[in-house]
Image (tube, helix red, strand yellow):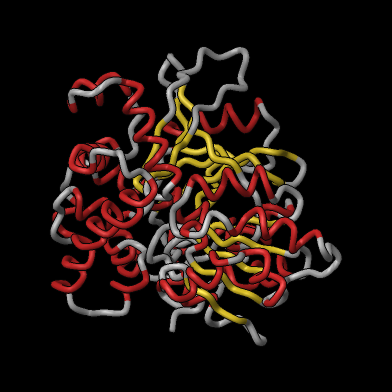
Amino acid sequence: MILRHIQSHLQTLLTHFPCVVLTGVRQSGKTTLLNLLPGEWRHFDMENSADRQQLLADPDLFLRLHADKVVIDEAQLAPALFPALRVAIDRDRTRKGRFLLSCSSSPELVKKISESLAGRVARLEMAPLSLAEAWQLPPSRLYPLLAEGAAIEDIQSAAASRLTVQQVREYWFQGGYPEPWLSTSEEFRSLWYRHYIDAYLLRDIGALFPNLNRDRYRQFIALLSQHSGNILNNADIARTLGVSEPTVRDWLGIAHDTFLWRHIPAWDRSAAKQLVKHPKGFLRDSGLLHRLLRIPDIDMLGTHPAVGKSWEGMVVETLLRGFENAGIDVNPFHYRTRGGAEIDLILEGPFGSGNFLPVEIKLTQQSDKRALRSLSEFVAAHNCPLGLVINNDERPRWLDDRILAIPAASL
């Protein structure tokens, strides 16, 4: 059993809201987490035909009969649930923690939540394993300390390495899906990822978008893996696949909304700079990326042309999962000027006296201060309390008065 850091925040939300919706990519561990809830919860799985028929026969009556401590797994398969859920919640708005829904991949579910359940529900995204979860470490203190604007000495102390560089590299190559981590067989892991893509296309995409050409979409996902970490040019992708730009935009939206792809918009708030406005993005799981790129092992990854972008994507996703698991809301951006200045990641959130945390990501052990000019200028221009460099060093080091380099092994 792999303990999940998000469980504490889920319990907190259940004390404040009548209903909580747990979203996330297929096979991220949602059902396992729901089965570990303390107390007497009734579980209904909408992939089970008997459970689904029981609910859909009369959703209003179902929710009157099961009015408290109810888990509905794969709720996107029962769209008639949502209007009835609103009525059930409004029948007694003061009671908290009554309903818990999960959903693997459904833009439609998010839309229905916004339309029908606004103010009545909290939504929480569960990702695959974070770096610390994969190695069964407790949550890093770094995330709440950054959000609290804690003393620099406390942040530096929390940024000490908790893993070996070999453990970080294994997680980077393997990715975070829980089931492959429960097996030591590399053959099983390779087969699992191959069949996972089939399940994603046939079950999730096929059910949500029945008119989508799945063969062409599979080609799109394979091509997208080659663009992971790059600024996207939809016209180039469209020409390669022989489809229109609107089709590429739609497919990117599907990949993002089904939690396969992380859309990172461009930073556009520096009026004095000529900024590149195109977004970039990453395949969210580095293990899935490496399988799609046919990288067989960690040694081959080290010499692959995509090694730098793969490392950047893994670190970005690790950071975002850490903040999400801690219940800290942040928004990611990338920064690039037409003059060539670049910052890998800018997080907007509650970072002490400032609202922004700029982050530069390096695969190397040491970082050249001369290469951090863009980061220093951004920290000064936006009065950021801190700028981070995440690398493979053994311990945290100060590179400037407000720029701290920390090892990825601390995350």
Q: Report the front residue among 408 and 94.
A: 94
Q: Report the front residue among 380 and 120.
A: 120
* Quadrant in the picture for residue 193: bottom left
Residue 190 vs 202, above or below: the answer is: below
- Count the labels in the image: 0
The x and y percentages for residue 367 are: 41, 43
The x and y percentages for residue 95 are: 82, 70
Residue at (67% x, 76% y) in the render: 66
Left or right: residue 358 versus residue 256 is: right
The x and y percentages for residue 382 are: 67, 29
* Quadrant in the picture for residue 251: top left
Left or right: residue 371 versus residue 160 is: left
Residue 59 vs 107, above or below: the answer is: below
Residue at (18% x, 42% y) in the render: 215
Of the 4 image quadrants, the one containing the N terminus is bottom left
Residue lying at the far front of the rendered structure: 57
Residue at (14% x, 55% y) in the render: 300
Residue 310 visible in the picture: yes
The x and y percentages for residue 45 are: 48, 72
Residue 407 visible in the picture: no
Q: Report the front residue among 354 and 388.
A: 354
Residue at (57% x, 22% y) in the render: 268
Left or right: residue 124 versus residue 148 is: left
Residue 208 vs 409, above or below: the answer is: above
